[in-house]
């Protein structure tokens, strides 16, 4: 990586993903000469800590992007649509965590372990995928390279962190209230999440699939350049603070043995195999939390179908599902000349 320091803006810096981006910068020692922390007007003047120094949050406005080299957006699709064209006009390379531009055919949707070669074109705007799609893609990629994906059935177990800091706080409060014998209240989610689970809280379309499920289908197809990939996702909220899990059955173009699958996953970038039947030790969100890698285990054959492999995945929604994938994109841009040398 270049030793040059970049002027870096983080939009939505006070949110869960924005805060995690700062921690990943520190963890990865991303070269920053100046941090420009941006948020909505209600957060202006508050402080965020980065690299041992407190930084005052600035107002998200056009003038804030003057001289910025790279901007990370994590403030929702509306803010992205409004301010990304301004940031681009000011000369910043943008990595967007929102859904605003993911399906724009002119904007690469990147998971570096899967389709990082798209960054060779030095794009000025790169979309970060949906958290569940990103975690799924990392696990599928080595098997796809081995035998070619044909179809995917996936059930997700999505943590409170997927809905942001307020959702995580709500789950924590519900657990405390339960222990105190109080009535549990739900405000962020439509139902009480503690000691419960429910279908993902996004609108259901006429086809019976909710928006989260639709995102997984559309984005996975785009990431792998497989527009006709057959997919059946079922997305569920579970009472876990952080890190998503997924149960996957993937079918391939040719037979794939268990030994082949294990070798491919064991040697894959961004994957850590956790598969110890003798200890009943497999991927868990409690172990995935704070990890950059996606944990994969319960790898097994599907009886009667030699072309299919089943497995279980856990990945940190705030890291590989958001902040780490975004910073990883920027690291790759530096390597490939997509940011100023």
Image: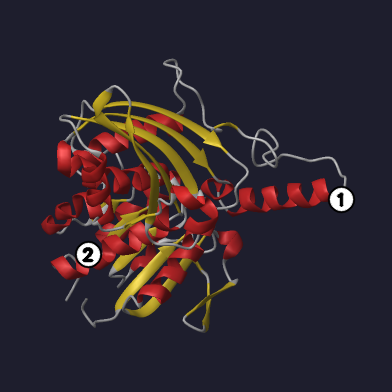
Query: Which disc is residue 332 wearing?
Result: 2
Q: Mark 2: which secondary structure?
A: helix
**On the image, numbered disc 1 is attached to which residue?**
180
Check the image and tell me how it is coloured: secondary structure
x, y percentage for residue 79? 44, 50
x, y percentage for residue 158? 52, 42
Q: Residue furthest top?
A: 206
Tell me: residue 6, above or below residue 214. below
Mark 1, mark 2: which one is toward the viewer?
1
Quadrant in which the C terminus is drawn? bottom left
x, y percentage for residue 269? 26, 58
Q: Is residue 283 visible?
A: no
Q: Residue at horizontal 39%, vertical 72%?
A: 25
Name the residue nearer the viewer: 254 or 304.
304
Q: Earlier in the sequence, mark 1 or mark 2?
A: 1
Please indicate whether residue 175 sits to the left or right of residue 138 in the image: right
Please indicate whether residue 285 sits to the left or right of residue 191 in the image: left
Name the residue nearer the viewer: 311 or 144.
311
Please indicate whether residue 57 sits to the left or right of residue 258 in the image: right
């Amino acid at each position: 990586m270049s030793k040059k320091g970049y002027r870096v803006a983080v939009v939505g810096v006070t949110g869960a993903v924005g805060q995690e981006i700062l921690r990943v910068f520190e963890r990865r020692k991303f070269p920053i000469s100046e941090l420009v922390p941006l948020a909505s007007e209600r957060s202006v003047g508050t402080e965020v800590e980065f690299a041992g120094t407190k930084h005052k949050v600035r107002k998200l406005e056009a003038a804030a992007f003057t001289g910025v080299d790279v901007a990370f957006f994590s403030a929702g699709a509306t803010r992205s649509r409004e301010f990304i064209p301004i940031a681009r006009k000011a000369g910043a390379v943008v990595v967007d965590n929102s859904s605003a531009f993911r399906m724009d055919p002119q904007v690469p949707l990147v998971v570096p372990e899967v389709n990082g070669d798209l960054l060779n074109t030095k794009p000025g705007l790169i979309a970060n995928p949906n958290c569940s799609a990103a975690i799924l893609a990392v696990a599928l990629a080595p098997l796809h390279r081995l035998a070619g994906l044909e179809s995917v059935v996936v059930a997700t177990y999505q943590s409170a962190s997927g809905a942001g800091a307020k959702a995580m706080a709500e789950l924590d409060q519900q657990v405390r209230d339960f222990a105190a014998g109080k009535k549990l209240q739900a405000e962020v989610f439509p139902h009480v999440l503690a000691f419960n689970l429910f279908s993902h809280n996004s609108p259901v379309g006429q086809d019976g699939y909710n928006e989260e499920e639709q995102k997984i289908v559309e984005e996975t197809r785009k990431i792998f350049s497989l527009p006709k990939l057959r997919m059946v996702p079922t997305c569920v909220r579970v009472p876990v603070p952080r890190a998503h899990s997924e149960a996957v059955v993937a079918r391939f173009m040719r037979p794939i043995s268990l030994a082949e699958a294990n070798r491919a996953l064991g040697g894959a970038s961004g994957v850590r195999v956790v598969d110890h039947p003798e200890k009943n030790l497999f991927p868990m969100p409690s172990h995935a939390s704070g990890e950059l890698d996606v944990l994969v285990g319960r790898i097994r054959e599907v009886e009667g179908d030699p072309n299919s492999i089943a497995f279980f995945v856990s990945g940190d929604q705030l890291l590989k599902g958001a902040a780490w994938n975004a910073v990883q994109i920027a690291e790759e841009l530096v390597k490939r000349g997509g940011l100023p040398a």
